[in-house]
Amino acid sequence: MMASTRRAFLAALIGAGAIGGFCGPLAPLHAAPNRLSRLPLRFPDSPLRLERRLERGIGDDAVIMVRRSWDVRCSRQGRGIMVTGAQTDAEVMAPPHLSALAQIEQQRDTSAMFPLMLDEAGMILSPGAQPGESDAVADALRAAEAMIAHQPVPADERERYRVYLAQVHQAGASLLDTLPPDLLFPTGVPEDRSETVALPDGLTGQFTLRYYAEPQADAPWLKRTERRVMTVVSGFTRSASEVWTLSPL
């Protein structure tokens, strides 16, 4: 995750009215990999299946899951690599009250995320459209969180925590909407970073980003990568995660 993503995260928090000050370190959540360039970088010479499984908690143990797959092919482009692809499958699982929106999301074609241009070290230079949810599903998730946050609860203080949790988590989970720069040719260097935000009424919230990427055993391209965002506000937690895999057709 580059510094621009972190700035977007802070902007989202400010837009949600959830941040009053920033208490965490200023380092980016995912620093640019320090990897020596390999010329030429070896890439797969046959089509592969790229799959992404995204899970977002939306409160009260409810989860929305989106699984997509694309058939992709790599080709040499100057000193770098071009990755072309097309979506081949999609599956969405969601609570019953989001079934209509889940159907819309399942029918959405995300092939516009390709082509991807990679540099000579395999880092993504120019991503296409990001594979995040459609505007309709994003709106539905916000509406679901608002509905959950405003349900009657035993104590006003607990209600406040839940509202803040939904706001902070919405911004933190947006970190998964940007492709990791080393997605297709992972460096194998794990990341485990935390940020703390100051909330109204003297409260604090914290989100943690964990990132792990694994290349193939006998090749430099992706085998499996996972990113997980965990948000905590006064003991209340919410999580979001994604897993990417690349395998033979």
Image: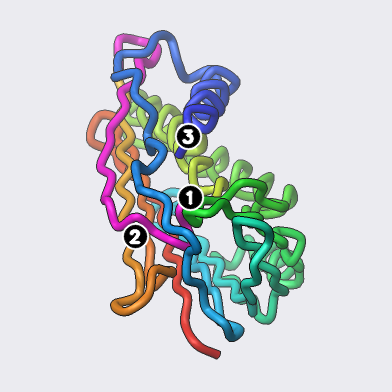
Q: Residue at x 49, y 68 (%)?
A: 53
Residue 48 image offset from top left, x and y in percent: 56, 82
Are the residues flagged by discs 1 and 2 in contact, CB closer than 8 Å?
yes
**What residue is shown with label 1?**
180
Q: Residues within 10 Å of mark 3 (few under 14, many from 20)?
A: some
**What residue is shown with label 2?**
213
Mark 2 or mark 3: whose residue is earlier in sequence: 3
Which contiguous range is marked in magenta?
A: 182-203
Residue 44 image offset from top left, x and y in percent: 52, 78
Between the C-alphas of marks 2 and 3, the distance is: 16 Å
> In the displayed structure, would residue 245 be above or below residue 119?
below
Quadrant in which the C terminus appears: bottom right
**Observer-nearest residue: 216 or 2?**
216
Q: Residue at x 30, y 47 (%)?
A: 210
**What residue is shown with label 3?**
2
Between the C-alphas of marks 1 and 3, the distance is: 9 Å
Q: How many marks?
A: 3
Mark 1 or mark 3: whose residue is earlier in sequence: 3
**Viewed as shown, does residue 204 lie left or right of 41?**
left
Are the residues flagged by discs 2 and 3 in contact, CB closer than 8 Å?
no
SS label for mark 3? loop
